Amino acid sequence: MPEYTLLTVLGLVLVVLLELLVLRTGIFRSLAYWLSMAIIMGFQVLVDGWLTKLHAPIVLYEESQTLGIRFPFDIPIEDFGFGAAMVTMTMALWLKVTRPERAPRGAA
């Protein structure tokens, strides 16, 4: 598997495991999270599409390090996984740090 693809998949898996097993913020059950991800991905398509366009790229990728699948606007599909992992990690950590811990039931 190409390196960028492998690291993207690894990043996604680690972020999901960190959320589900350690942070436990419940972010994946939140409508606000999914709406935020849709908005972020929408802007990512615009910006990343401009940065990676094949006819005049600003950011170059070593094709041997990706799957070679580019959609839409010449965006390597790995960029979406990388972006999702990065944003999810940031949001989950933010929730963990800013939410006060809930006292266990029955605690006085």
Image: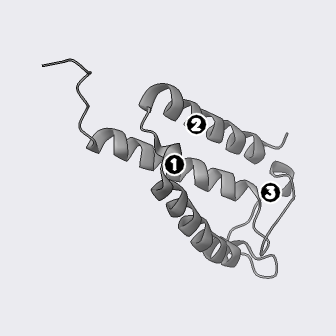
The image shows residue 51 at horizontal and vertical percentages of: 66, 74
SS for dot 3: loop
- Taking the spot 84% from the left edge, 57% from the top edge, the residue there is 63
Is disc 2 surrounded by few (<14), some (14 to 19) or many (20+) residues within 10 Å?
some
Q: CA distance from mark 2 to mark 1?
A: 8 Å
- What is the crowding at mark 1: few (fewer than 14 residues within 10 Å), some, or many (at least 20)? many
**Which amino acid type is marked by label 1?**
Thr
Check the image and report above or below for 40 versus 108: below
Q: In the drawing, what numbered circle is on residue 88? A: 1
Which residue in the rendered view is the most extreme toward the left? 108
- Name the element at disc 2: helix
Q: x%, y% of residue 20?
A: 52, 31
Residue contact between numbered discs 2 and 1, judged by CB atoms under 8 Å: yes
Give the spatial CA distance, label 2 vs label 3: 27 Å
Q: Amino acid at mark 3?
A: Glu
Q: Are marks 3 and 1 in contact (CB under 8 Å)?
A: no
Q: Is residue 92 left or right of residue 104?
A: right
Q: Earlier in the sequence, mark 2 or mark 1?
A: 2
Q: Where is residue 91? Give x, y as percent.
A: 43, 49
Element carrying mark 1: helix
**Label pair 2/3, CB-CB below 8 angstroms:** no
Extreme residue in the bottom direction: 55
- Disc 3 target residue: 62
Res. 45 image quadrant: bottom right
Q: Which residue is mark 2?
A: 16
Mark 2 or mark 3: name the one nearer the start of the chain: 2
Residue under the point 64% across and 77% down: 46
Badge 3 or badge 1: first in the primary sequence = 3
Nearer mark to the viewer, of 2 and 3: 2
Q: Is residue 20 above or below residue 29?
A: above
